[in-house]
Amino acid sequence: MMLSKILLASLIGGLFSLDERAVAQTMISRPIVVSPLIGFILGLVSGNPAAGLADGLFIGVILELIWIKVIPIGAHVPPNVCLSSTLGVGLSQMIQGERITVLMISLILAVLSGLVLREIEIKNRELNDLLANRILRSVEEGRLTQVGMLNLLSIGITLLTGVLILMVGLYVGVNLAQIVIDSLPMKIQRGFGVSFYLLPLVAIAAALEAFFRFKV
């Protein structure tokens, strides 16, 4: 069951990650969209789609508010919000434990993974620069048929990278998080219970801070 969930979440998250930059940029890759969808689908697999949707919506809203001011403009490379959101929701649906503790651990790992995945995204963009230069040479040499092929190659590399990252991240993350949760003292888990209700306020404050600092 867990492996099927990992494969399903990886494929869906990889496809949605194409929307961030490679294909359409319709904003469906934002946490507020992709997280509830993946939570609902994984919930269907588990037989409880309502719980999956609720967990996905909670994680998606928190991550969206935290990263709402992170905009991919120019050369700035933000955290990979789509893959990290998929990772967070996937973990929340596969880890066994008290619900609030599971959600908090999943959120922590999602935020950390977004920062790590940013470095992988930088390498992916460097590879795309090489492909772009090759496309320009193909146009100059009149080999126009290669232009479409190279564009598809770039999309395929982005998709494959996202799927593989999620597969490895979910498999390692589930096992690592399960060990952590099983070893957590009850005092810390009760602390997560308090943080769970304060976290939305922190996320809203982060979003408001971004708006107040915005200057036209």
Image (cartoon, helix red, strand yellow):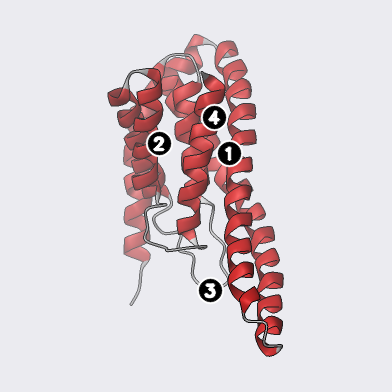
Q: Quadrant of residue 109?
A: top right
The tag earlier along the polypeptide, 1 or 4, is 4
Q: Residue at x 47, y 14 (%)?
A: 97
Q: Which residue is mark 4?
A: 6
Front tag of 3 and 1: 1
Mark 1 lies on a secondary structure that is helix
Mark closer to the chain start, 2 or 1: 2
Residue 163: where, in percent of width, then height?
58, 43
Residue named by callout 1: 166
The picture places residue 63, in percent across and down from the top left corner, at 41, 44
Q: CA distance from mark 2 to mark 3?
A: 30 Å
For this rendering, which residue is in front, 152 or 62? Answer: 152
Q: Nearer the viewer, mark 2 or mark 3?
A: 2
Instruction: Provide the residue designation for mark 3.
Output: 74
Q: Are marks 2 and 4 in contact (CB under 8 Å)?
A: no
| Residue type at the position of mark 2 | Ile
In whole angstroms, how far apart are the C-alphas of marks 1 and 4?
8 Å
Picture residue at 67% right of the left edge, 87% below the top: 142
Question: Are circles 1 and 4 on residues that touch, CB within 8 Å?
Answer: yes
Say which label, 2 or 4, has the lower sequence index. Answer: 4
Badge 4: residue crowd in 10 Å (few <14, some 14–19, many ≥20): many
Q: Residue at x 65, y 67 (%)?
A: 128
- Measured as percent of width and height from the top left, residue 144 is found at 62, 81
Looking at the image, residue 123 sits to the left or right of residue 31; the answer is right
Nearer the observer, 116 or 139 = 139
- For numbered disc 2, what is the local secondary structure? helix
Q: Are marks 3 and 1 in contact (CB under 8 Å)?
A: no
Above/below status of 181 relative to 119 = above
Q: Quadrant of the C terminus?
A: bottom left
Q: CA distance from mark 3 to mark 4?
A: 33 Å
Of 137 and 30, the residue lying toward us: 137
What amino acid type is highlighted by mark number 1?
A: Leu
